[in-house]
Amino acid sequence: MRRAFTVVELLIAVVVMLAVIIATSKIFNTASKVSSTGEANADVLQQGTVLEEQMRRDLERLCRDGYIAIQCVAVRNDVNQVISPSANAPLLNPQLDASVILRCDQIVFFTAGTETSARWAGPGDLVSGGGGQQSRGARVYYGHGVQFPSLPNDPTSNPPGSNPNSIIKPIITGVSPAPSGLKQVVPWTWFDPLTYQLGWQFGTTTQTAGPRVLANQPEARQWVLARKSVLLTDDGGRPIYYPEPRNLPLAGTQGPSSAPSIFGDRSYTAAAGSDPSYFQELRDRNRISLSTNLIPSPVLQSGWVDIAASDFGKVRREMSPTLRLQTPLQLGGGAVSLSSMSVPFNTPGNGVAPISWPVGAGAPAWPSGSAIVAVGNNMDTGAINGFSTQRDRIMRGTFGIPATTNISNTFGLLGWPRSEKSVGNTDRKSEMLTSPTLVTNCSTFQVDWTWEPLTGRQTDSSGAVLPVTARLSIGAAPAYAVTPTITTLLRGYEPFADTWPANAEDPTQRVRQQPWFGFPDSGDGTVVIPELQQLGVTLAQDTAVMPDIPRGGSTTDRTNFHMRAVAQAIEGTVGAAANSPAAILAPFGAGVPVRVYTAVFGFNQDEAYTVTPDGFIVAREDYTPWPTQIRITATIHDPRLVLERGREFQFVLDVPKRRKD
C-alpha cells in the first residue's frame, strides 16, 4: 500500500501550482493596471474639468476696463541639451521626441466682482480684519508656474544685509552663476547641478552667501499650471510703503501683506531711505515708469502675497499714460492748442507727431522740431524717448518681455509666478505658495484666439462704411502716412472668398474653417511646430486669413486692409526692423529653440478712428478690438504618471461682449 507521493507526482503538483500562481498573478497585475489606469483617467478628467470650469467662470466676469495679454511660448523638447550640450541634460519630456514643441502659453486679463484673498486668516495678520480680504476687481493669470519646494521660507541671511526692514520672503529673479547669461528662471530651467544654483538677485546685487538651492525645474509632465489671482485693493500692507498698520514691530516681523503695484520698476537699484532697493517694486505712485524699466512685480511673482495696491485707473495710467505738455503745441496755424498727449507715439521723441494727427501740406501739420516736454518731475530728462508703445509697456509690465530689440533686456522672461504643489513646513503663511496651483501636472498649455466676421467695421448713421484719411502701408515695417486726399474704408475683419461680385457690398461668403491666431504653425523658420502638433494656427496679419482684395481695382475699398494694420499693432510685425515690434521673438538668442509670440489687446476696443480739429477722420493707432473667442489646448498628466503621454484637452471660450447700457 502506497503511503506517500512519488517524486514525479510532487513535481507535477509543483508545476501545476506554479501555473496557477502565474495565471493568478497576471490576472491581478492586469486588474491592478486597469484600476491604476482608471484612477489616472479619473484624476486627469477631474483636473481638465476644473481648468475649463474655472476659466469659464473667470471670463464670464471679464472686465473691459483693463486689458488682455496673451503670450505664446514655444519650447523645443531638447532645449536644455542645446544650452548645455556637455552636461548630459535631459529632454523636457522623456516620452517625446527631441523635436516636439512644448507650449508654455500665458493669458492675463482682469475681472470684476468679488474676489477673496487666499492669505491665511490667523492671529498676527497685518490686516485688521484677520485675513480673507476681498476686492471688487482682480487681475487673473493662467499659465505655468515655477517650483522651488526646497527653498527656505525665512533665509538665515536676509539679502542684501542686515537692513532692519528686510524681514522678507525669498524673491526669485535669477540664477547665479548662469551659463551663457541665461539667468532667468522659467519652467524648463535646467543647469548642471554641480555648477549652478539659485542665487538671490535684486537688481545688481547677488546673494552669494547664505541659503542657496538648486534652480532646476522638474520634467515637463510635472509642471504645474497656475491660476494667479491678484486682488486690486490697498490693505495698508508694509509700513515702509503705507502709513498702516500702526503696530510697526509686528509688521516688521510679518513682512508685507500686499504689493504696492502689480508692476515693478527695475530702475530702483539704489536705496531710497529705509526702503530696500532689491524689491524693485513700482513704489512711487506719482511716477510713470519708462518702458525700459517696467517688469512684473517681484513680490507678486514670488508668491507671498495676492494683493496689490492698484486699481483700474492706476493700471491704465501706467500702461497708457497721458502726459501733460509743459509748453502747449500750436497746431493748424495756432487754431488748435495741444496740451496733452497719450502713448503710444509714432517713433516717440522730440517733434514727432502721434500717428492719429495729419502731417504735411494741406493739413494742420505737427510742428516739426518742437520739443515735447512733459509737466512735472515724474519722469527723467528726455524720458519721452523711452515710453515706446502701449503694446511694449503691457508686454514688459505683464511678462517682462521686450517688444523691441534695441531696448536692453535685463530680466527677459520674468512672467512666471511661483506655484508649489505642497509646502514642507508648518508656517501657515506658506500656504500662499500653493494657492495658485490649479493643475498639478500639465506639460503643455496653449492659447489661441480669433475674431468673428466684421469685427472692427465702422459705419455711419446710414450704415455706410466709414473712410479714414490714411494710407496704410502693410509690410515688414508698417507705416501710417496720413494724407487728406487718400482714404481707406474701415471694413473690419472679412474672412471671405477671394472674389468680389459686381455691385456687392461684401466679398462672396463661403464656408471656411474657422481661423485661429497665435503662435503660427510655421514658426519662424527655425522653431517650427511639427505636423502632428499643428492646429491650424496663423498670424492674424497673414494674407491667408486676411486677404487683401480691391473692389473693382479700388485703392480705397479693399478687404482687411485696415484690419491687417490693426493686427500688426496687436501682435507685432513679421520681419520687423530693429526698432519695430516683432511678431515672433527669440528672447534667449536665435540659437536657443525658444520662441515667443505676444498679442496685446489694450484699452481702446471700440474707437477705430479719431476726428481731428479740421474734420479729418483718421485711423487710431491704439485701436485693438478684443478677441471674440479663445481656444485652450492642454496636456494633463496624473500625479503618478501612469498615463505616460497624458491626455489632451481642448475647449473654446466665448469672450463676453461689452455691455451697451
Image (tube, rainbow, N blue to C red):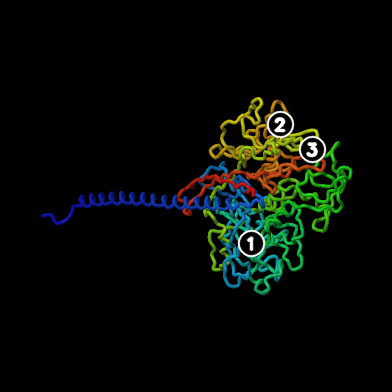
Instruction: Name the residue: 70% across, 51% down.
Output: 396
Residue 321 lies, in percent from the top left, at 75, 52
Of tags 3 and 1, the one toward the viewer is 3
Residue corresponding to mark 2: 557
Residue 109 lies, in percent from the top left, at 63, 51
Of tags 2 and 1, the one toward the viewer is 2
Instruction: Name the residue: 69% across, 29% down.
Output: 550
Q: How would you rate the neighbour count of disc 3 (Cα within 10 Å): few for under 14, some for 14-19, many for 20 or more?
A: many
The image shows a total of numbered marks equal to: 3
User: Nearer the N terminus, badge 3 or badge 1?
Assistant: 1
Tell me if residue 411 can be seen. yes
Residue corresponding to mark 1: 307
Figure quadrant of residue 571: top right
Q: Which mark is residue 482?
A: 3
The residue sitting at the left extreme is 1
The amino acid type, in three-letter code, at marker 3 is Val
The amino acid type, in three-letter code, at marker 2 is Asp
Q: Nearer the viewer, residue 276 or 551?
A: 551
Task: For mark 2, give the secondary structure.
Answer: loop
The residue sitting at the front extreme is 462
Instruction: Name the residue: 21% across, 50% down.
Output: 8
Task: For mark 1, give the secondary structure.
Answer: strand
Task: For mark 3, give the secondary structure.
Answer: loop
User: Nearer the N terminus, badge 2 or badge 1?
Assistant: 1
Q: State how far apart marks 2 and 1 are (Cα).
A: 49 Å
* Left or right of 92, for residue 7: left
Q: State how far apart marks 3 and 2 are (Cα).
A: 17 Å
Tell me if residue 574 can be seen. no
* Left or right of 506, for residue 480: right
The amino acid type, in three-letter code, at marker 1 is Ile
Residue 486 lies, in percent from the top left, at 78, 33
Quarter occupied by the N terminus = bottom left
